[in-house]
């Protein structure tokens, strides 16, 4: 939660004075998104997220992205 909030405030510094309101809105939105898991269709949502949300392809992309960023950083630093 804090990571998401910090990145939002870093991208949009105008939100800094309204940090409490931003936290409340963010918590409400994430609560409503998670509320679907508590309904009768929650198992279907979990199955969809488990089947299509992650897998070896996402892991491979993440590892390649880390390698590419490390290579770029080492070349130009």
Image (tube, helix red, strand yellow):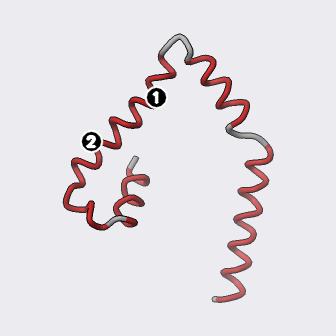
**Image quadrant where residue 51 sits:** top right
How packed is label 2: few (under 14 Cα within 10 Å), some, or many (20 or more)?
A: few
**The C terminus lies in quadrant:** bottom right
**Residue denoted by label 1:** 34
Q: Check the image and report above or below for 75 versus 53.
A: below
Residue shown at 44%/24% (left/top)?
Answer: 35
Q: Residue furthest left?
A: 17
Residue 71, how many percent across, how many down?
74, 78
- Disc assigned to residue 70: none
Q: Residue furthest top?
A: 40
- Side (left or right) of 28 relative to 44: left
Residue 43, how many percent across, how many down?
61, 17
**Image quadrant where residue 41 sits:** top right
**Image quadrant where residue 3 sits:** bottom left
Q: How many marks?
A: 2
Residue shown at 55%/18% (left/top)?
Answer: 42
Residue shown at 41%/36% (left/top)?
Answer: 30
Residue 46, how many percent across, how many down?
62, 24
Q: Earlier in the sequence, mark 1 or mark 2?
A: 2
- Side (left or right) of 12 relative to 77: left
Residue shown at 49%/14% (left/top)?
Answer: 39
Q: Check the image and report above or below for 40 versus 2.
A: above
**Residue denoted by label 2:** 24
Q: Check the image and report above or below for 58 versus 17.
A: above
Mark pair 1, 2: CA separation: 15 Å
- Side (left or right) of 43 relative to 5: right
Where disc 2 sits, the SS reads helix
Where disc 1 sits, the SS reads helix
How packed is label 1: few (under 14 Cα within 10 Å), some, or many (20 or more)?
A: few
Residue 16, how many percent across, how many down?
25, 62
């Amino acid at each position: 939660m804090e990571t998401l909030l910090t990145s939002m405030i870093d991208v949009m510094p105008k939100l800094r004075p309204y940090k409490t309101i931003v936290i409340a809105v963010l918590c409400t939105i994430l609560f409503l998104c998670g509320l679907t898991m508590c309904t009768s269709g929650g198992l279907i949502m979990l199955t969809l997220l488990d089947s299509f949300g992650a897998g070896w392809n996402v892991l491979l992309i993440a590892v390649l992205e880390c390698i590419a960023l490390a290579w770029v950083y080492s070349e130009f630093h």
